[in-house]
Each structure stands twice: as C-alpha cells, then as structure tokens.
Image (spheres, coloured by chain):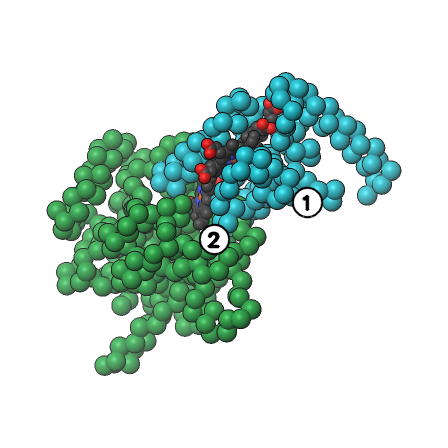
C-alpha cells in the first residue's frame, strides 16, 4: 500500500529484532539461542518463566497445563500450549506464520539438537489458527490470544 | 420403565467412587452461583478455577420440531469443532469415507414398525451419569468431568476403541487418517477416539449454549434446549418439568444428560 515506507520500516524493525536477539543470547550466556527472529518473543525480554527454568522445565509446565485444561477446564492461562506457539511462531517474508515444528524453527531446532521427538503437532496446530473460541461463539482472535499471554 | 430425573440417584453403589467424588465437590461448591450466563464473570475455567459439580450440563431435544433432511446442527457442530477439516484418503470410496469419518453429531431416524411413524432426531454422546465408555476404558482416557461432560483425554487415549463397543448410542468415532491444518482450539489427530463434548471450551468460557443449539435456534426450529439440569430455574429444567421427555435406552439406567421429547 504505502510502498515506499514499508521496506524502511520493516528494515528498522528487523534491525531492532536482531539487536534484541544478540542481547538475549549474550545474556543467556551460551552460544545457542532458539528464539526466532520475527516471532513476538524476539521483541520481548522474558518468557513466561525465567529462561533457564524454561529450558529445563517447559515440558513439565505444558503437561501440567494440559491436564488442568482437559480435566478441570482451566483455559487461557499462562502455560497454555496455544500461548507458547502464538508467541514463539516466526513469520516468513510474506507475513505468514511458519510452523514451530518445521526444520530450524523454535521448538524443532532445539529438539533436534537435544534428540527429542514430540508428537504434539500430530494434533495441535503448529501455527496460530483460529481463536480459542470459535467465531460462531464470538471468539475474537486477537483479544483471546492477548489474554492468553498476560 | 420409570423415567429418571437428574435428582434421582441410580444404582450409586455400583459406582461408589463417582458418587463420592460428586458429593465432595458439591459440598464445597458455592450454592446458587449462576455459571452459564454469558456475562457471568469470572467464568469457571478461564481464570484458573476448576469446574465443579455445581452444574450438570444437558440437552433437551424436541423431536417434533426436528425436521427431516435438515442438517443445520450437524454442519454447525462440524464447523465449530473442526471436524470438517478431515480429508478423504484418495483410495477410499465416498461411501466408505462417509461411514468412517469422525462425527460428533448424526441425524438418526426412528421408525415405529406398528404405526409407521417416523421420528427424526440428532444423536450424539448422551453424557451419561454412569457412562459405560468410562467403565471399559483401560487407560482412564474416557472420563466424566465434574460438571457431567463425558470427555476423551486424547493424550491418554491409546485408540483401543473398547469405548466405541461399549457405547449403546454409537456416539463415538475414531480418527483413522492423519489430520492437517487443525484449528488451535480443537486439536485432533490419527489414532484417537472422540465424541461430543458439549462444546467444552464454550462451557469453560461461560457461554450460554452450544454450536448445535445456536444453529437450530438461528434457523428458527428451536428443537434443542441446552442448560444446567441442576439449576431449577434454567430453561432446560423448566422445559423438562413442563413436557414429557425420555432417555434413549432408559432400560440401561445410565441417567443420560441428553433427553428427548416426542418419542
């Protein structure tokens, strides 16, 4: 649309993201950083819990959330899997989300390195697709996802 | 067989554990809290509050208003729950696919051989108080939530399909093929059993009804009422009190959460 503007703005944002990423990795204190440029997480400082804790314990958090949701109906809280994907999914040049379990993407890059295989994405959408509540039920994607990440 | 109402206890001794669980939760649940209104906040579930046995969700279907050939509820269910995202394997015939693809809600026809009267009705999981699927499940994947909704925990389901054999209503189906492009809100994949969960995430967000009910109402048929059978003032309780209704296979004394009028 405003064709002249977009490349510069996109460039600036990218530069900013790269700086943020470099800073994060240095802070993390090791050579590996799995947060993908272009994801919402890349522009943020913190995960839902301290990074070092997340690296070791994210599976416990998600599995606890899983049982809480399926058995007790607790939804939209901090550790929801939909929330991880929403914040960590990266975007291709055309703005389309890239599945978190695709090669070199957030979940799969580290899992490949650690030789972990998860079956979650046989069932769970690996990109945000639709709101937690259907449109028919009045679900508005942005509102719902924002609440998920508070 | 005598008709069973939600208040009555049926054969509780046989499933003592459920009786105990329900009693304990009912005792701690605040009485009189209206959980099913769209504007009731915070809704159970969304704010980290576990569901309780204060409500028991159910459906009342007036078969006199259910039209021959109408599929409004079936289609709305498929859309809401992403069931329309299943794809037919290339090698399978359309007839075999129609038979095998997973559905939560089907239209069924009852014919009285003596009188020739034909009744149309939507058939789905009947959300039994004493669900046979839960009895036979070897892993605990089939279970009943505190609010009476019978659910498959697909993280625990091993796909053995005992529950499909045990269900007197043939309300469960199996995902035979890999599924792609699932919606975030309704995960689904090959090798698990599934069935109607009364639009469970709508329940946890405190909405007033289900996709099938909304569609039936919007189309002007108004054949299905949804609500809390434990709340004497809810539309479903009032309707159950006002008109005669039955449970399918009453002889099994499962105390179903889905009731039919006009049978």
Which residue lies at the image location 62% right of the left edge and 19% below the top edge?
Answer: A29
What is chain A's hue in the picture? cyan
Query: Which lettered chain is shown in green?
Result: B
Q: Secondary structure at mark 2?
A: loop
Q: Chain of mark 2?
A: B
Q: Look at the numbered discs 2 and 1 and tell me whether their residues touch, using CB distance below 8 Å.
A: no
The correct choice, above or below, for A42 with respect to A105 in the image is above
Q: Is residue B243 visible?
A: yes
Q: Which mark is residue B189?
A: 2
Provide residue B168's location: percent of width, then percent of height: 27, 62
Q: Which mark is residue B75?
A: none
Mark 2 → mark 1, Cα distance in angstroms: 23 Å
Q: Quadrant of the image for the C terminus of chain B?
A: bottom left
Left or right for A19, reference A121: right
Which residue lies at the image location 68% right of the left edge and 20% below the top edge?
Answer: A23
Provide residue A117's location: percent of width, then percent of height: 51, 42
Which residue lies at the image location 74% right of the left edge and 44% below the top edge?
Answer: A94
Which residue lies at the image location 69% right of the left edge and 35% below the top edge?
Answer: A38
- What residue did someone put label 1 on? A96
Q: Secondary structure at mark 1?
A: loop
């Amino acid at each position: 649309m405003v064709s002249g503007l977009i490349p510069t703005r996109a460039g600036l944002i990218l530069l900013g993201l790269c700086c943020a990423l470099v800073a994060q990795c240095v802070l993390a204190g090791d050579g590996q950083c799995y947060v993908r440029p272009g994801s919402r997480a890349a522009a943020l400082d913190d995960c839902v819990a301290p990074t070092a804790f997340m690296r070791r314990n994210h599976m416990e958090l998600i599995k606890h959330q899983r049982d809480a949701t399926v058995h007790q109906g607790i939804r939209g809280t901090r550790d929801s899997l939909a929330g991880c994907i929403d914040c960590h999914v990266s975007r291709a040049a055309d703005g389309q989300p890239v599945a978190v379990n695709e090669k070199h993407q957030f979940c799969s890059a580290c899992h490949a390195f650690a030789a972990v295989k998860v079956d979650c994405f046989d069932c769970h959408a690996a990109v945000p697709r639709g709101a937690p509540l259907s449109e028919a039920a009045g679900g508005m994607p942005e509102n719902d996802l924002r609440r998920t990440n508070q | 067989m005598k008709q069973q109402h939600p208040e009555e206890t049926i054969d509780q001794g046989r499933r003592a554990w459920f009786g105990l669980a329900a009693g304990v939760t009912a005792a701690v649940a605040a009485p009189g809290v209206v959980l099913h209104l769209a504007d009731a906040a915070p809704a159970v579930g969304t704010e980290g509050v576990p569901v309780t046995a204060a409500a028991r969700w159910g459906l009342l279907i007036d078969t006199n208003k259910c039209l021959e050939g109408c599929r409004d509820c079936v289609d709305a269910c498929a859309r809401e729950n992403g069931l329309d995202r299943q794809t037919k394997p290339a090698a399978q015939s359309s007839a075999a696919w129609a038979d095998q693809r997973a559905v939560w809600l089907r239209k069924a026809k009852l014919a009285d051989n003596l009188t020739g009267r034909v009744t149309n009705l939507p058939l789905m999981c009947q959300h039994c108080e004493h669900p046979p699927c839960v009895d036979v499940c070897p892993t605990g994947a089939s279970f009943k939530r505190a609010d009476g909704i019978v659910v498959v925990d697909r993280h625990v389901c091993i796909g053995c399909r005992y529950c499909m054999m045990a269900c007197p209503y043939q309300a469960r189906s199996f995902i035979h093929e890999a599924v792609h492009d699932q919606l975030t809100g309704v995960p689904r994949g090959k090798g698990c059993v599934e069935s109607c969960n009364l639009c469970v995430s709508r329940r946890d967000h405190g909405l007033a009804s289900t996709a099938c009910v909304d569609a039936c109402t919007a189309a002007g048929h108004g054949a299905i009422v949804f609500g809390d059978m434990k709340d004497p003032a809810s539309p479903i309780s009032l309707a159950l009190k006002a008109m005669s209704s039955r449970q399918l296979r009453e002889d099994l004394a499962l105390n179903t959460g889905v009731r039919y009028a006009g049978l």
